[in-house]
Amino acid sequence: MATSLFLSPHRSLRGSGVAERIETPAHDAGRLQADVAAALRRARVRGNPHPVALGAIPFDTRQPSALVVPLVSEFVDRNDAMPGEAAELPPILHTQSIPGEERFKQGVRQAVANFGLSDIRKAVLSRLLDVELAGQADAGDIFRRLVARNPSGFQFRLPLADGSELVGVSPELLLRKQGARMESNPLAGSARRDADPARDREVSEALLRSSKDAYEHRLVTDEIRRVLAPVCRDLKIPERPSLLSTAAMWHLSTPIEGELQDPAMGALELACRLHPTPAVCGFPTRLARKLIDLVEPFDRGLFAGMVGWCDDEGNGEWAVTIRCGRVAGNRVQLFAGAGIVADSCPDAEWAETQAKLQTMLGALSARGTA
């Protein structure tokens, strides 16, 4: 049976087999929630005492969701669920960036010019890196390598209906809900880490001082406040961001906590209200989406969507689907994005996507092939 994994510092989940698939687009959030609730009720009738819906929702909420109710699901100790040794992967034969460097930079310039002619204040532009291997790409081995190099954050491996698999390790929590308590941890504003400790510290300090990155981050936290404040009786959002690090990147981070006015409001409903945040789309959302559709020459699919789980008690956890790849045959599609604001420099934004791609390229044993 196909196995799905969502590993988290909070609760880790393993699902085996597929009892039902749920493909209702999240654009119709009410119908999606109703379909998930009905599928979980049917799972209970079939004898599953604690059913969950597990999977991913695309960046474009008009596209089909990729959720499943597993035949068997269990919460597991994160350390026990960590996969073992990975086999060698076939070497990389070829990589192709879509768009290429010059077209990506032109897109950044186009977005910045658009800011002066519209109400858009931020747009997240991304690129796809198509990687061709010399032989079959084993998603399990890629996932094992990824987890070994990135033991923190949220790791996921999801078999998809078309036979491909989504694997990744995201540092960004969209929404966690347990009872009446909810948490979110948006990231926006990034810098590549340096191997030299002294220079790495300078990089992190420069990121904290950066007015451009602070502005980009504030657009995200302000929008999350706008969405969550009406449904929370208590919402704590720090005035200034702190730093969060991964193996490859520094990020500006704001941990958010709240207590819901209605504890019955489910994790999926809350996550759908937040998605997509300005961290992966832009601000204002509708106008930024239009600009992304105009500039990006590919379909993001599940990249920049959300990945995680929910149960029939309304609890759940959803991470932002970044630092990820879609594995099919001997090809792996990788993705990376950068938040564009008025002060953005095309060269710097391209370099940021290069740095972010290193998380997945490292799992493919690639060196400097982006």
Image (cartoon, helix red, strand yellow):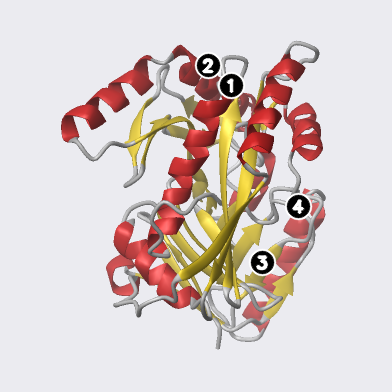
Q: Is residue 122 visible?
A: yes
Kindly state the secondary structure of the residue where label 2 is placed: helix
Q: Is residue 266 visible?
A: no
Which circle, 2 or 4, is nearer the viewer? 2
Q: Specify whether 200 is left or right of 292.
A: left
Q: Is residue 64 left or right of residue 313?
A: right
Q: Which residue is mark 2?
A: 215
Crowding at dot 3, Cα within 10 Å, few <14 / some 14-19 / many 20+, comes out as: many
- Amino acid bearing label 3: Leu
Q: Label 2 sits on what residue type?
A: Tyr
Instruction: List x then y, in percent, for residue 276.
Output: 66, 40
Whether residue 321 sits left or right of residue 154 in the image: it is right
Residue 26 numbered mark, or none: 4
- Quarter in which the N terminus is drawn: bottom right
Residue picked out by circle 3: 67
Residue appearing at x 35%, y 80% in the figure:
87
Secondary structure of the residue carrying numbered label 1: helix
Q: Position of residue 26 (x, y in %)?
A: 75, 52
Up/down of 26 relative to 52, above or below: above
Q: Tell me residue 42's x, y (percent).
A: 70, 78
